[in-house]
Amino acid sequence: MNYPDSVRFLYSLGNEIKTAKFGLETITALLGALGNPQSARRFVHVAGTNGKGSTCAMLEAALRASGLRTGLYTSPHLEKPEERVRIGGDAVTEESFAEALNRVHAAAEALIRDGRIERHPTYFETVTAMAFVLFRQAPVDIAVLETGLGGRLDATNVVTPAVSVITRVDFDHEALLGRSLEAIASEKAGILKPGVPAVFSPQRPEAGAVLRGRASALGCPVTGAEEWTIEDCRQDAHGSRFTARRGKEVVRVRCPLPGDHQVENAVTAVAALRVLDIPGGAIEAGIASVRWPGRLETVSTRPEIILDGAHNPSGARALVDFIRRFYCDRKVTLIYGAMRDKAVAEMASILFPAAASVIVTAPAQERATRPETILGLAGHPDIRIAGSVKEALDQVRGAGPEEAVFITGSLFVVAEARRLI
């Protein structure tokens, strides 16, 4: 398969949430047939509900700044699937991506013929195996892995990492991960390995108790991000500057990712990087260089348009805090679209009051919630429908300098808007 064929084939495997198969049997057999590429490299493994993607980006940037050849595996992608696999800071080439898929697909077909697996690996299992193959082939010194869904039975959970990182745990994908915070935290804690150091972001008490209990049972030395104090923190709409201090250790952070939650993510990254003995200078340089598209990303100044992939209530609250802190004197228009498996009514009740006007829309995805449905779930004194993301953008083209447009609710909405803009 060439690159266009490989992309079509991956999409033919189905939506990665709807087709998710919890269990490690298939990915373990697949990687075994490929020579266990996941055993050839060092990893940092990251789970959590919110912040894990941007934390992964900070970790990779600092590891690269220290002189290491890095890999980064994240999901989902915004525009092209090869964005999920990065080597040395750059997405792998289309040719490398297609070659890796051919190798993984051939191994899967052989396993099916031999009766060793019953089905073709899912979209996520396939791309995860491709990432391991590409990291071995590069080769990389260390790779940062973001879990896809949960942790315990996630396809990435086949590594014994140098350090395990768990960012803030909150409600998301309850139908798959559990209806309580304790149940969700238990799934995230599944990435912990015996004796492997763990780093935890600040957690709600019920989630923190589960994480620390599991770490204690496995003999994992735990570093809490709250062990690092934050001093002289200065924030604006474009990022933050602060000093992270633990005893005599001092790291001066300049983080170009805006929002209180990114300060928390940056401190979590600092804590994990120091567990790995990465020097403070490399940490400072790496975090200062990080980019994470689609998360409080300003993509237009006239009019000012900010993209943020807030797709669950916790992410929505973080976005509202940001708007009220830095855009309280501006007229805010919100463009919102969401997927059916999300807490749409709860998110709308959090987000809509922060905006002077709301446009509800839908991305070009089968699982999208129809705008009419959103309209019926949450009221607003100035709310209207746009049949597509393009139509929503057309409605705000004439926004004046006193206005700011936030596009949010789903990464599919953000990705579509980003392409159009």
Image: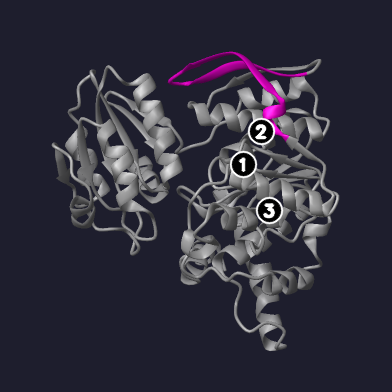
**Horizontal relation, residue 365 to residue 243: left or right:** left
Residue 299 image point, x, y percent? 38, 31
Task: Quadrant for residue 265, please give it.
Answer: top right
Viewer-side label of 3, 2: 3
The disc label shown at residue 189, or none: 3
Q: Which element type, helix, strand or loop, lies under badge 1? A: loop
Q: Which residues are magenta?
A: 224-246
Q: Are marks 1 and 2 in contact (CB under 8 Å)?
A: yes
Q: What colouring style does the render use?
A: one colour
Q: Quadrant of the C terminus?
A: top left
| Quadrant where the image shows the N terminus | bottom right
Q: Residues within 10 Å of mark 1 (few under 14, many from 20)?
A: many
Where does label 1 land, which residue? 167
Q: Give the mark nearer the N terminus: 3 vs 1.
A: 1
For label 3, the SS is helix
Residue drawn at (53%, 43%), measured in percent from left and top?
Answer: 50
- Disc marking residue 268: 2
